[in-house]
Amino acid sequence: MNKIANNELDTAAYKKLQIVHGLFAMVIAVFIIVIVCFNNRVASNILSRNDNSLLYVAFAATILFPIISNYIFYRRIEEIDLDEPVKFRFNNFLTANIIRYLWIFGAATLDLLVWFFSATLLIAAFIGFLFLIFLLIRPIKIKVIRTLRLKPTKPQGE
């Protein structure tokens, strides 16, 4: 009986994971809104049009940071002992996700700064790409259950 209860999804921990993901997504969205609002008036075209060095840095971060985040995430997932109690597994899973989110958030922040200073629409496309990746890696219940090899929680009526 305890083994079965030990292998069920902890709804509160899952909600915490969703909140963490939502906060990161909201902060990126707010940064995008702020940059769009202030870009035309304050800092647009501070960099000369011939200076593409920051564009290359932003492109490299946009490509490499999600790859690095996935690599680190899956390495940490492999290290989770599936025989541990759900609480410990989920804490390790949450940590792996936060590290993953931070890498993508870092790339998005770098791209936002470059966009603020250069006003290049290509950087806006990079940010859109990173935001799309961020939305695609959101914590879906079935993925969490499958990754941690849990049983879905039973409805309260059963």
Image (cartoon, rainbow, N blue to C red):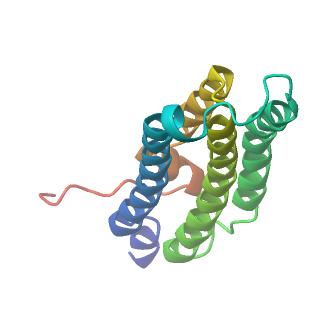
Above or below residue 8? Residue 62 is: above
Rendering coords of residue 128 (x, y %): 56, 29
At horizontal 66% and vertical 24% (from top left) the residue drawn is: 120
- Residue 41 percent location from the top left of the image: 49, 36
Quadrant in which the N terminus is drawn:
bottom left
- Percent across and percent down for residue 25 are 46, 47
Q: Relative to residue 66, is residue 12 drawn left or right?
A: left
Q: Is residue 13 above or below residue 78?
A: below
Location of residue 113 in the rendering, given as x and y in whole percent from the top left corner: 65, 45
Q: Nearer the viewer, residue 53 or 85?
A: 53
Query: Disc count in the image?
Result: 0
Q: Write down the quadrant of residue 129 in the picture.
A: top right
The residue depicted at 67 percent of the width and 39 percent of the height is: 117
Q: Residue at x 73, y 51 (%)?
A: 74
Residue nearer the viewer, 51 or 129: 51
Quarter of the image with the C terminus in it: bottom left
Query: Residue at the spot x=61%, y=35% of the render?
Result: 130
Seen from the viewer's position, the closer of residues 101 and 137 is 101
Q: Which residue appears farthest toward the left when viewing the image?
A: 157
